[in-house]
């Protein structure tokens, strides 16, 4: 359980409340193409409105690299949030984020009103956790609420620096929910506990593999990262993704799994293609049978069955990383099979953000999962067992 103060532990009546949200939504021609992150932020905002606070929302959007880039303005988010909340969200347009315009907008606020500041990354200091911008943000408010799980693994002005200058810093409902689900799954799971890792690289998930081997009953490895495990045993992997430098690491992890009594599963067959394209020629081969010139782009049907069987009796399942190049329909079947296996069981099922969250939603299994994290990088660092700076900065209970 999260040992941090939350919005339930404070009284915001008449107070100015700065709320760090994660409104880093995909935009196409000024239109929001996926509003999950806006919807996920509503419970905290509604609670603060009901309690009579003056709510000042802030977030980053994309990577404007410290400059005001009009295409990365949060203005469209204010419009959509107004609709979702059913009350106006005033946009405090201001290239300096906390400039004269934003300050005037805050001064004019009544209890229960909501404004949204401009993209915090318009300011170069934001990602450097600079003191000046942290102070400016803090000067707007009496209380700080961090509800941005997606950036909790970073120490920036708007989620960490600002807490040096505001005494009351608590977490919002989304942050609390993320940490309760991920934290409980990792530290206090109902067993059997199965973790599934996929995606492109072993190197980006080294600490996750290592940490999870201390916790799980079964660890399933699919996706591009599996080929390094195969190559470590001298098997031919053709043009498949391979990280030579991590072959020894793969063997070390297999040894660790054996010592810990953890079942570690890697694919027993593979869908291979003669090009990295959906239209490439493709076929299924067994483990160790990938010819030169071909590359593995998905797990094969026998592996789907092997993985589904391992998931079937689990009581807790955590999944991060697709089983193959699911963006290409011809190589999505393995990822679909894992999503389906998770959707079919009576267990706590958690999707660790990023590509796997996109895959699960895109494939229509979203509402079948217990929890889909809104933070890819943050949930990975959580699974690595790290303390997230954005969480650590909130007041303890
Ligand atoms: P990650 O960000 O490490 O979770 O990697 C996600 C990406 O890995 C997705 O874009 C997948 O298309 C890609 N991926 C998964 N399996 C493979 C594979 N066998 N070969 C190449 N890319 C893969």
Image (cartoon, rainbow, N blue to C red):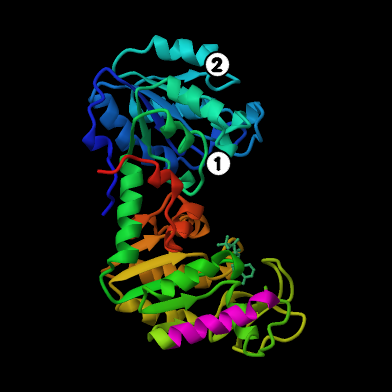
Q: Is residue 230 above or below residue 330?
A: below
Secondary structure state at the residue bearing disc 1: loop
**Chain-order first, disc 1 or disc 2:** 1
Is residue 254 part of the magenta span, yes or no?
yes
Q: Is residue 195 above or below residue 378?
A: below
Q: Quadrant of residue 325?
A: bottom right
Q: Position of residue 319 (x, y in %)?
A: 43, 66
Residue at 51% across, 84% down: 254
Secondary structure state at the residue bearing disc 2: loop
Magenta-colored span? 243-258
On screen, residue 280 versus residue 140, left or right, reads: right
Q: Position of residue 79 (x, y in %)?
A: 46, 25
- Ligand 1's quadrant is bottom right
Residue at 38% across, 22% down: 141
**Number of numbered callouts drawn:** 2
Residue at 51% across, 73% down: 334
- Name the main secondary structure of what is drawn in magenta: helix
Q: Which residue is mark 1?
A: 26
Query: Residue 99 — which label?
Result: 2
């Amino acid at each position: 359980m999260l040992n941090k103060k939350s919005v339930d532990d404070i009284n915001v009546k008449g107070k100015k409340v700065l709320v760090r949200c994660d409104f880093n939504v995909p935009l196409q021609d000024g239109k929001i193409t996926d509003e999950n992150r806006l919807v996920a932020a509503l419970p905290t905002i509604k609670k603060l409105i009901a309690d009579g606070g003056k709510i000042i929302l802030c977030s980053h959007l994309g990577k404007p690299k410290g400059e005001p880039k009009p295409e990365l303005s949060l203005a469209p988010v204010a419009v959509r949030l107004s609709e979702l909340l059913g009350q106006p969200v005033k946009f405090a347009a201001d290239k300096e984020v906390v400039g004269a315009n934003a300050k005037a907008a805050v001064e004019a606020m009544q209890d229960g009103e909501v404004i949204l500041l401009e993209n915090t990354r318009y300011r170069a200091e934001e990602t450097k956790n600079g003191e000046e911008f942290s102070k400016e943000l803090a000067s707007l408010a009496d209380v700080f609420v961090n509800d941005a799980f997606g950036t909790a693994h970073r120490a920036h002005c708007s989620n960490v620096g600002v807490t040096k200058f505001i005494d009351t810093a608590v977490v919002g409902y989304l942050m609390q929910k993320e940490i309760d689900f991920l934290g409980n799954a990792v530290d206090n799971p109902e067993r059997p506990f199965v973790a599934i890792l996929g995606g492109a690289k072993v190197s980006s998930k080294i600490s996750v593999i290592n940490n999870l081997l201390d916790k799980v009953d079964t660890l399933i490895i699919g996706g591009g990262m599996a080929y390094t495990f195969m190559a470590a045993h001298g098997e031919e992997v053709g043009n498949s993704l391979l990280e030579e430098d991590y072959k020894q690491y793969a063997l070390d992890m297999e040894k660790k799994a054996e010592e810990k009594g953890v079942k570690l599963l890697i694919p027993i067959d593979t869908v291979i293609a003669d090009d990295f394209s959906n239209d490439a020629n493709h076929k299924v081969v067994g483990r160790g049978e990938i010819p030169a010139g071909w590359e593995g782009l998905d797990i094969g049907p026998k592996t789907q069955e092997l993985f589904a069987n391992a998931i079937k009796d689990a009581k807790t399942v955590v999944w991060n990383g697709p089983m193959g190049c699911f963006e290409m329909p011809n190589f999505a079947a393995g990822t679909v099979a894992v999503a389906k296996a998770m959707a079919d069981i009576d267990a706590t099922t958690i999707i660790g953000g990023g590509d796997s969250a996109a895959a699960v939603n895109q494939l229509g299994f979203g509402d079948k999962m217990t929890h889909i994290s809104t933070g890819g990088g943050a949930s990975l660092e959580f699974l690595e067992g790290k303390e997230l700076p954005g969480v650590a900065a909130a007041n303890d209970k």
